[in-house]
Image (tube, coloured by chain):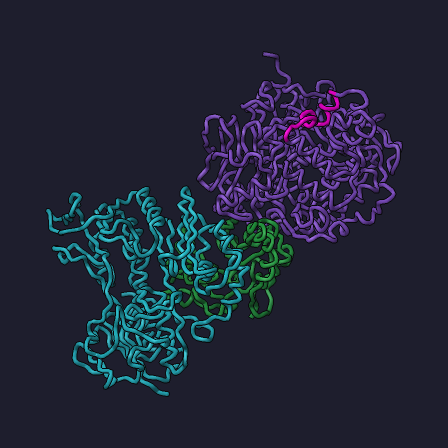
Chain colours: A green, B purple, C cyan
Amino acid sequence: MKVLKIVPEKCTGCLRCELACSYVQTGAFQPAKSVIRVSPYEGHTSYAPYTCTQCAEGWCMTACPVGAITITAAGAKDVVDDRCVGCKLCTIACPYGTIFYDHDTRKAFKCDLCGGAPACADACPTAAIVYAEAETADWLADFAVERSARLLAIGAR
Amino acid sequence: MSLGGYAGKLLRVNLTTGKIWSEPWTPEEMRLYVGGVGLGAKILYDEVGPRVNWDHRDNRLILATGPLAGLPVWGTGGLTVVTRGAMTNGATSTQANGFFGACLKFSGYDAIVIQGQAPRWAYLYINDDVVDLRDARHLLGKDTWETQDALSAEHGLSGHQLSVYSIGPAGENLVRFAAIQGDYGHVASKNGCGAVMGKKRLKAVCIVRGTRALAAADPRGVIQAADDIAHDLKTDPSARSLYEWGTLPAVVGLYKMGVLPIKNYTTNLAPPNVNMADWEGPKLRQGFDHRGHQCSACGMHHCHMQVIPKGKHKGELVDEPEYEGWSGAGWAIGCTDPTAVAWLNTRIDRACVDVNEFGWLCGWVMEGIEKGFITKAQLGFDLGWGDAEGANRLLQMISHRKGFGDLLAEGVKRAAEKLGGAAQDAAIYTVKGASPRGHDHRARWDEMLDTCTASTGTLESGIPVHVTEVGLPPRINPFNGEEVARQVAGILGRRHFEDSLGACIFTTRTRLENMCRALSAATGWNYTVTESVSFGRRTAAILRAFNLRCGIGPDVEYPSKRYGSTPTDGPAKGQAVGEQWEKMLDTWYGLVGYDRKTGKPKPETLKKLGLDWLLKDLWGKKR
Amino acid sequence: MAARHLIIGAGTAGLNCIRTIREEDGGASEITLVTAERPYSRMVLPYYLDRSIAESHVFTATAATLATWKVKTHIGRKAASLNPQANALTLDDGTTLEYDDCLIATGSRAVKAPVPGADSPGVHSFWTLDQARAVIAGIAPGSHVVMVGAGFIAFTILNSILSLGARLTIVEIAPRILPRMVDDKGAALVEAWLKKHGVKILTGVALTKIDDARGKKRLRFKKVGDLLADLVIMATGIKPNLEWLQGSGIRMNHGILVDDHLRSSVPNVYAAGDVAEGKDGVTGAPVVHAIEPTAMEHGRVIGANMAGRDVAYRGSLNMNIVEVLKLDVASFGAWDASGAEAFTGLHPERSAYRKLCWSGDRLTGAIIIGQAGDVWTTNDVGMLKGLVQTGVRLGAWKEHLRRNPFDVKPAFIASRTTARLLPETTLGRPSRAPELPTTVTR
């Protein structure tokens, strides 16, 4: 299956992926509605995007009381809008923190891989997000460990 | 429903009374004034009278962004600061990037207009509809990075969830060339805007990344235009090295033209122990732990964070110096150790002064110590060429106005005028009071002319790229004053257009046509290159009218003696700008349609620009 | 193995069990379902109450779905008694059903405060679909609704009541609201938020009686004055439906005691959901969570085991989320463990609150409160769940979180929580997408 492979070393924190994602989600530019989120490491010197891994368990999907989350042809767990009632159970069931609730539409929303052509990967100017055939993995941990050692050391002082 | 690209509201803050309100602006105003400096110039002209000096409480500090900020066009987190600045006591337009503009737009505002003076130190907090002034006394004395760290921790928000623009100790202590710094390494540095902020007792503006939607009239069109602009930046020879290496290649590039300022303009030759090949762009990134630190939506490999690899400051996080840093914190003061420059440059950003002015000032002090027009006793310590640690000591003295630092805090022009004689002869400044950029403009006459004639405290003509688009020749002889003046006049106001969009000086290094297309897609207008040119000139005319009302006219449009001198070595040896200066001004005035004697935009120029309302102010009978 | 499975109860646990059996065996076994009501989701009744969904939307399995799954149904029937020795269940109409294995998932029911007048017309519970229908029929714009009880169940319908245009007063006998969902500090924040938005709240008041007063209900209290209401909703607790198992020999405490495969004291009788006292994911101790996610996990694990697989139950995480007037309130795990080390963070102006509870350097519980619009804060909710669920060791990040309990993301990621989670599945295989019930219109 093709997955969103994250290459954190390449991310510069420009957040263009969030703009692209929110545009696909809403038709406007609104990072608050993006399902890919760039977070900082080492205070403010390093960044990496983070989004749904389309995990095997599908915690959001199994938690949904009305079966509103399904698996698309691209292999993404996807919210079926007219089934979702907005109960938010999925948002606390997902242990990755990658499904969100939109209080304007009163629906849950998450990464659906844009139906197989993810806008975030297209928008990334540094190829830090690549849509590729791969086994999904913990793309960020090594990077995050390295890029937080200093922060933790400063805090321990 | 607001016009696409715009949040639609201006945020107003009166620090004296604590009143905060927002006001809409109309689509007609948006089209006329666009945003950034265009919008700021109009507000400044309307609201800041001639008696309202830079340090008057009624002075306005306008933090404006523009219609492209927050959109996926590269480098669109833009902030333009417009105010009556401390260096020239005239109009100011100075830019920084980072995420300010994007955060502000997503919060629902296109600009913040600040007036008054806070009864006690405050910072402005913006979180969508929640906007208030908060006690900043616990932040006093903190440098700009410490201030952002503290606010991040205080609000439990990290990285780009918060954009903080603040002043460091230099701003608090009203250092005349204090800057406003934000998002770890982005500085609106010109004309003492940080001193204005300090005078207002405003320590910081802290914007929580807004949650609102920003619509575009044609969002696909915006993305398409952004892609085309990116293509230009990646492939056009004038921008490609910027894309790859930011402004680093400028060090060697400008050195080869005699434009790299070395040791306070005393030479244009690198010392014999320096191999310029070590100063190639890629080389400057080698040996550092490098981390991209881009502005909103930017794909340029320009802004970086780095970790000092060796020496006393090993392990410290710094902002990779921009070209201006390599020059102001480096070559201009004779410092050619890249590690030391990188460290000092960030100290300058954190204390928060203009790195250019610091370079001219520090280089001048170093020359003074060497030649004796400043004594060690006066300074309190010895300061030789290239001494980065000593330069930092000087910086701290200035930032806290300690000892001799109190005089230096007035900037090199005022300090030199005070000392007079050889000291005055050695100082680099414009008579108007503006600090030149970190170049040796004796080999870059276009920028010298622009720096001296501009009404912004810095430049207003723009970088001469894609000039054929506006009917100018692709190349000129840089030492032919006539050709130089024609070029500068021909692109007058291009910078104002760029600085009104909420974009960056580097990501606008594309054809105007592309920028206009992005603007049209965002707003739904049919914005043409012609309109952008007349917009830029309109803004320049308004700023000029403002300055004239403040008493700043053609009599101060001159370089200082050293600034306008003739290089004695290097590639531009013997090229004497001074000899052609008056002729350059004549040509420039003729072409921009301003009156050579009074400096006023001529009535026909005003009419052509749709500035009939300025006619009476400038040419009408005295009331 | 063509076994005969008997499923008692068509709530979350029962239906997940059936679905999982069919995922595993493709229809080979025999499944019989006994249920008092047509299968629907209680979780979504609040959205039916405010009419944001049609009634047909609440049903989780239609006759057609059940037929596709080859399930024999006894809808409208209640289980009357169980004879584990004979592997037989007797229904309330006397029918006897035999099984090879059986799931007890009879759920719970609402209980009212024991005061005179509690059973009179106009005093409602909000638990079943029928009760929801009755409340819908009773509320009109401008109605004054008095909610007795300020727990999770009450809070799930606050938004709906207010959006119907009713005025709302909440009365609670305890000194504060949400006693089993958040701590005192969190409760105070939520209470202030509700009051700011016009909801009247009376805590520490004991209801003594409800009587009729000129077409309205009059509520009398021990110390404070009377309240007049158009409609009273009692959200004063729920009770598991276990009475019918008296004498069956199944071992029970607060619920049916189950082992690590969710088997009761009788090995071919499983228990799930609100009637099961299963392992808590954090403490490992037996507990009745009585929450939807636990029922779902119970049902799936049991379904796989009934289908012949050996799937151990790792325990579920206690968790709740409710949004009231765009304030998100969520809690996980052992957020109220007495004596546990806890860090808190509060931003009163943003109504944002965090509590992180620790055992050593592992997160064992959390509370998170924040405005729904404050997305940069509230979106950490899932990561907190992940940290509690995995019990990943946070090491030096613990100190970081002490200083900044809101900065969860880097701690989550640098502690390799994702790597821990990726191989985790409840059933030892990827989950399948649910078959979506065809929406029925009546």
Q: Residue at 63% across / 41% down in the picture?
A: B186
* Front residue (pair C16, B341): B341
Indicate yes or no whether the magenta region holds residue B403.
Answer: yes
> Which stretch is magenta?
B400-418
Q: Which quarter of the image is occupied by the C terminus of chain B?
A: top right
State the residue in front, A131 or B622. A131
Q: Is residue B410 magenta?
A: yes
Q: Residue furthest bottom?
A: C1
Q: Position of residue B340 (x, y in %)?
A: 73, 43
- Residue A11, above or below C101: above
Say which of A85 and C413 sits in front. Answer: C413
Residue C106 appears left or right of B393: left
Q: Is residue B400 left or right of residue B340?
A: left
**Residue A18 location (% of width, % of height):** 54, 53
In this rendering, does residue C157 appear at all? Answer: yes
In this rendering, position of residue B287 left or right of residue C324? right
